[in-house]
Image: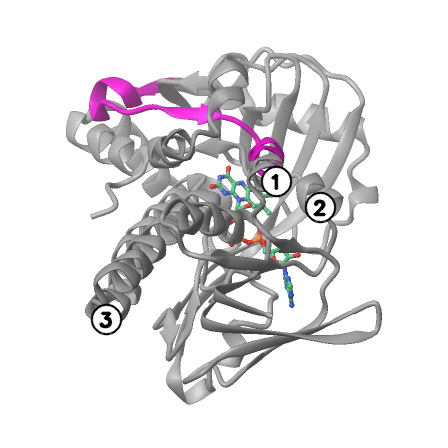
Amino acid sequence: MRTQVGIVGAGPAGLFLAHLLRQEGIAATVLERHDRAYVEGRVRAGVLEQNTMDVLARLGFDQRMRSEGLVHEGVNIVSDAKMFRIDLADRSGKRVVIYGQQEVMHDLFDAANQLGVPIIFNANDVKLHDVATKPYITWREDELLERLDCDFIAGCDGFHGISRDSIPPDARTSFERVYPFGWLGILADVPPAHHELIYANHLRGFALASMRSRTRSRYYLQCDLHDRIEDWPDERFWDELILRLGPQAHISTGPSFEKNITPLRSFVTEPMRYGSLFLLGDAAHIVPPTGAKGLNLAVSDAVMLSESLAAYYRCGIRSTLDSYSDRALARIWKAERFSWWFTGLTHRFPETDAFGRKMQTAELAYLRQSDALQTAFSENYVGLPLN
Ligand SMILES: Cc1cc2nc3c(=O)[nH]c(=O)nc-3n(C[C@H](O)[C@H](O)[C@H](O)COP(=O)(O)OP(=O)(O)OC[C@H]3O[C@@H](n4cnc5c(N)ncnc54)[C@H](O)[C@@H]3O)c2cc1C
């Protein structure tokens, strides 16, 4: 088999890239280790930046997002049991939409079926070869060894994939911060506590009231990394959430049907290109979910790489291939900074003593009062421009 771009991983980065390349007339084949139901079933991101909405519209896949997504023009922050609102639309001219990653993946897979984008599911033992020069990918399908020759490989296989490790260790540098806590998240079919998101900084730890629809809520609590799901029966979860979010959140309780604990990490590997291999999305970088940036960064990487590859195939301009990594990293580091800063401002760290807590409270009070800070917050939250 031969194609122009071999894409490893059918998550957001891989599927957005496949569709954007198709729109540019570039042939791509996607290899995915799992089946569609597994990838589509993962409960993850829920906040789409304006850039991501625009890309879905450009691809013509935004019909369901426009009818079912919830457009948010602001976010709320609780500090010292008092809530204040940041008007994102007023301060940045942009909005975010609440539309779950599961829905985005559903739309991308349906469109791939309709448009004939080749996706090979259940590809086992995927290996990348000769990534520096003439790359090819091998995998096992029903015990048979298959091979795909390509001009380029796009490593879109997430943080635990194989693409990043296909770059020799001496040709890459990684930067990492592992946070000393996790997020315990639940989904429940109860109406959301508020029509917009609420981020809470509480003495006992962070809490977030989010949603997936007008009838489905997504809630998170900062928890200990050693906590197990069994330690958090629904009753304990609701009690703690009500306490941390405070009286402004009108929480309806009910049985949860999804509960998971996610460790938090900031991670970037540089550069995001080695020879004919490009890295995109979580394969190259991770952000703590506080800033809601992970999926959105995967989409902006896909846009930037598709533009570089289109310029290369159309006009033979190699310099655009060379600049992909620098261009992507410039934006990624700003999103890393925002996610790290917002995490530091709203979470309780083991070393947060009385002084540290006073600093958090003072900074949140300043954010509440300052037009300049609220504008900076809004610009980052809705997503910085791609250029
Ligand atoms: C709890 C939680 C909440 C989040 N909330 C938000 C949010 O609100 N907003 C936001 O923007 N982001 C959020 N994120 C982050 C977001 O979900 C990820 O950043 C996004 O999924 C990254 O997409 P990706 O395509 O790069 O990687 P992934 O989604 O990890 O996809 C990688 C794909 O590659 C496949 N794969 C792996 N290894 C191989 C292999 N060897 N061969 C073939 N295929 C392989 C995997 O099966 C997978 O399908 C959240 C994440 C979590 C965990």
Q: Which mark, residue 109?
A: 1
Q: Measured from the top left, where is residue 45 in percent x and y?
A: 55, 38
- Dividing the picture into quarters, in which one does residue 232 lie? top right
Q: Do the residues labelled 1 and 2 touch (CB within 8 Å)?
A: yes
**Vertical relation: 51 (above or below) 188:** below
In the rendered image, which residue does mark 3 sit on?
318
State yes or no: discs 3 and 2 in contact (Cβ < 8 Å).
no
Q: What residue type is labelled 2?
A: Arg
Magenta residues, as a range?
A: 84-107
**Marks 3 and 1 in Cβ contact (< 8 Å):** no
Relative side of 102 to 346, left or right: right
Q: 359 or 318: nearer the eye? A: 318
Check disc 3 and give the amino acid type: Arg
Mark 3 surroundings: few (<14), some (14-19) or many (≥20) residues within 10 A: few
**Is 79 on the left-hand or right-hand side of 220?**
left
Q: Looking at the picture, how far across and down is residue 229, in whole percent?
A: 78, 44
User: Which quadrant of the structure image shows residue 321?
Assistant: bottom left
| Picture layout, residue 193 above or below residue 19 | above
The numbered dot on residue 36 is: 2
Whichever of callouts 1 and 2 sits on the residue coming sooner in the sequence is 2
The residue at label 2 has a CB less than 8 Å from ligand 1? no
Colouring scheme, one of rainbow, by chain, secondary structure, one colour: one colour
Look at the picture and state if 176 lies above or below 300: below
